[in-house]
Amino acid sequence: MAIGSSEISEVIRQRLKDFDAEMVSADVGRVITVGDGIAQIFGLTGVMAGELIQFPGETFGLALNLEEDQVRAVIMGPYEHLLEGDQVKTTGRIVQVPVGPELLGRVVSPLGEPLDGKGPINSKKMAAVEKVAPGVITRQRVDTPVQTGIKAIDAMIPIGRGQRELIIGDRQTGKTAILLDTIINQKGKDLFCVYVAIGQNAASIARVAATLEQYGALEYTVIVAATASEPATLNYIAPYAGCAIGEYFMDQGQEALVCYDDLTKHAWAYREMSLNLRRPPGREAYPGDVFYLHSRLLERAAKMNKANGGGSLTALPVIETQANDVSAYIPTNVISITDGQIYLQSDLFNAGVRPAMSVGISVSRVGGDAQTKAMRQVAGRMKLELAQYRELAAFSQFASDLDKATRDQLERGSRLTELLKQPQYGPVPLGIQVGVIWAGTNGYLDKVPVARVKEWEEGFSRYLRADAKTLVSEVEKKKALDDDLTKQLERAAKAFNRQFGVEGAGAAEAEPEAEEAKGEPKAEAGKAEAGKAEPEAKPAKAESAEPDEERRSSKDRRAAERRAEKAAVEKDRREKERRAAARRAGDQKGAKSAKPAEPERRTTARRADGAERRQAERPDAKERRGPERRTKGTK
């Protein structure tokens, strides 16, 4: 069947009518040189700073240096196949990553590519890695805590939702452990987590993923991994990508936590990029805008007000120091940006303190606003007491004799230090934390040997979980201690101390003991004056109830111990006075023996002549006192 020319013309007209070609405008340039992950490109006259550009072979780069006659760009990915003269095109967009709940439970690269072998990520939304931080008007004050499950942090250095809390310390001091414990403790809560690994080896990142999966925390966590073998560009982008993933949840009115582990390696990657881009170096060879590198990242953490969704993004950056030097360039920069820091000391870590937190210079600038009322009530002055204890412990090494107040402070501080020790991957719920810290700060640990404090804490935690479930649930529900809950805590602590074999000592019994100690001098004086009044008081004790007898017997023993201690002190004082008197008497005797003998004889003779004359003038006195005077005269 032949086809006529009219039919062919009709088909062509219909095709031309339906043809819709999108016009694409792109600047084109040519590669001049490639090396060290940096490409020098001629052309690209309309490229924007930070724009994504495309190289041959589906390789992308980031335009950073816009110079007069060329563009310097960092290449994100392998660049060995790029040659001089290759064509480069602009894309008209900046670096973006996929965001959304589809990323939960996955390990991705800084560009959003899956690294865990679980298949593609079917994300429906993309977000730019760079974004302007929320303004002041859109924010609200931080008033909700991020429960880390670590007693020392939740009690003394609280972290609030929307806060930026720096974790700083030497390598191998437990910085990553704090991050993982915090993530694990969010199980069953409404906080999504993003863990950003920067410049770490792949084995460490795999261990982190396995640990989170083991404790059931990977299901609400996204891991953004930039290994040490990746180009510096990916290490540079990684924290911004993790922040963009967390900001998605904040924009939806939800709560998110981003952990940057660590920003020291992030600064190293940026320094490497800047030096390869021929940017002028500054202090420690860092470029001049290294402060802005971290400030524009951490300022994106915020607590939004209700009009803007009410979500929050909390940032926990990590900084690694060299030989505990917190005055270096990058540590001081990040300290000035964040809302507080948790300082981990290698000396404490080596001494077995976990977490190895230095209470003296660790601080949360949000403070009690980031704590529940119950924790504020029980923690009280613990931070100050522990800081003073560390100083006293250092100075007491050189002191041979300490007063009682110093000894008591050292004993209390050593027990509180043991109480706050905590194993890794073992976060403690809020109700158990409140109960344990309340018992420690109210004196129920004072009679427990320091070596058994850990055993006491574990036993008391089990006791609260098993026999005081209602108490724990009420504390977690009310988040405050009223009189009824306080009395329940007192009964629980006393009951457990009896089971533990320790005499109950606490705030309720400490006050009568103090009054008894103050009244002891008066009681002893009354005994001396009353004489026989004491035997009449003894039968009254026998008539008291059995619990009163036990309590009084324990008080009598403590009073006897105090009297024995006072007697020993008094004995030492009297012995010192006796020795001092003996020394003074010996000095006087030596002074007399040093006088010449002749003047002493003349004085004696004059006294004898005077006595004889007085006796001669008064005969009656002579008869009455003569023998005595004569005896003195003969001497």
Image (spheres, rainbow, N blue to C red):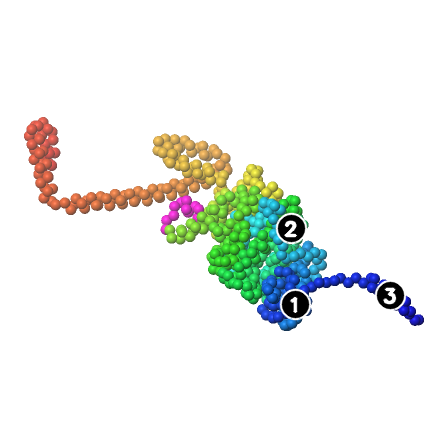
Residue at the image position 67 percent from the left and 56 percent from the top: 127
Q: Nearer the viewer, mark 3 or mark 2?
A: 3
Residue 250 has which mark? 2
Q: Which residues are magenta?
A: 400-410
Q: Is residue 115 visible?
A: no
Q: Is residue 616 left or right of residue 330?
A: left
- Would you name the residue on which mark 3 appears? 11
Q: Which residue is mark 1?
A: 29
x then y, percent, for residue 318: 55, 56
Q: Is residue 258 magenta?
A: no
The CA span between labels 3 and 2 is 54 Å
Mark 3 touching mark 2, by CB under 8 A? no
Sequence-first disc among 3 and 2: 3
In reply to whether residue 401 is colored magenta, the answer given is yes
Q: Position of residue 587 (x, y in %)?
A: 21, 45
Q: Earlier in the sequence, mark 3 or mark 1?
A: 3
